[in-house]
Amino acid sequence: MTPRQLTLTSPNRVPTLTEIFRPISRRLSRVDRALRSWPGSSSPVVRRLASGTISKQGKLIRPGILLLITGHLGYRDGLDILLAAAVEGIHQASLIHDDIIDRSDFRRGEQTAMQRFGPDYSLLLGDFFFIRSISSSLSIKDREIPRMLAETARLMIEGEMEELAESYNFNLSRARYLKIIEKKTASLFQTTCRLAGRLGQAGKKEAEALEEYGRNLGLAFQVTDDLLDLVGQPSRTGKPAFSDLKEGRVTLPLILALRKADSSGRRKLTTLLEKIKDGKDEQLWPELLFQLRNAGAFHQAHRQAASFTARAREAAGRLQPSVYRQSLLQLADFVLHREQ
Ligand code: FPP
Ligand code: MG
């Protein structure tokens, strides 16, 4: 077994995203088209940069969740397409900005905007997607909706800043890490569910279950993302490996290994981490992975993600049975066992 391979318990076959989103596949294509039309009315430079950036869409998980929920609630107007595009636009904006902060050159198997256009244009491109999301939501009469989107963006920015401020803090606690990823990642999942519930006029109990689903799915999503940074295959994730480590981000597997180690083990680990700083000493990565695996850190982090997906499944299980609910349940399994 190579250091990067890790066998984590996975059920026989986890459905693919295409299978999960089958009940809404045509509507999800409309979201994709809506996003691609955004730069249309802008100046040529914006059109060129923005179209280049959305040439390869991501997994469209957040729009997919939104449409599954409005489908489940029997919502019939088209505003959910607009809102699904707005949510994805905020997500895209945050990734463009995140790639500037992380100095990332690769995402979704392609060069990042940061790599192609440099930090100045990328910063403005992220702003473009962000403000375009908010402005499109303003066409909805319900003023609570843009307010919720703006508030969520504020939380994401706070989470990202807090994470940055905790770089190389090897005393970071699990509780603090979870608080940060709740803001940075889970808040947009939770808001996506809340917005869908609001559009579809979910009852109080349903709305609560939906928000709980979104929050827990988002937490699981980020924990698996942090695991994939260490044990994923770049050919599957579309992102370079160890980028968290190179930037000094202290993620759950590290926190768990550091917590378990005795004082000499801790010293060994932190020395190794310091040496890996800024992507130097690549030959030390296998050694670090070996130590993390020996400490059971990957399995423990996976168990943490599994506990969040179990809570998400439990919340979705409180909804009335439907094909859409079935997809929401399957999505929890996908998030836990994803390789991309
Ligand atoms: C990816 O996480 C980044 C986020 C989930 C949020 C980033 C948020 C900001 C940059 C704040 C700005 C927000 C807006 C709305 C403009 P990651 O770095 O752990 O994942 P990665 O491995 O995909 O980079
Ligand atoms: Mg990043």
Image (spheres, rainbow, N blue to C red):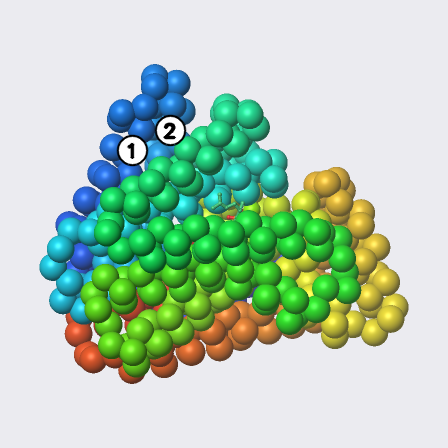
State which quadrant residue 188 falls in: bottom left
Residue visible at 83% across and 74% down in the picture:
262
Residue visible at 59% across and 66% down in the picture:
179
Residue visible at 20% across and 80% down in the picture:
320
Few, some or many residues within 10 Å of mark 1 (<14, 14–19, 20+)? some
Q: Secondary structure at mark 2?
A: helix
Q: Report the disc number at residue 38.
A: 1
Real-space Cα separation, disc 1 to disc 2, in angstroms: 9 Å
Q: Badge 2 is on which residue?
A: 50
Residue 224 or 316: which is nearer the viewer?
316
Q: Is mark 1 within 8 Å of ligand 1?
A: no
State which quadrant residue 136 falls in: top left
Q: Position of residue 56 (x, y in %)?
A: 35, 36
Q: Earlier in the sequence, mark 1 or mark 2?
A: 1
Q: Amino acid at mark 2?
A: Ala
Against 41, residue 185 (above or below) is below
Q: Secondary structure at mark 1?
A: helix
Q: Is mark 2 within 8 Å of ligand 1?
A: no
Is 256 positioned to the left or the right of 319 in the image? right
Q: Are marks 1 and 2 in contact (CB under 8 Å)?
A: yes
Marks 1, 2: nearer the viewer: 1
Q: Quadrant of the N terminus?
A: bottom right
Residue visible at 71% across and 55% down in the picture:
166
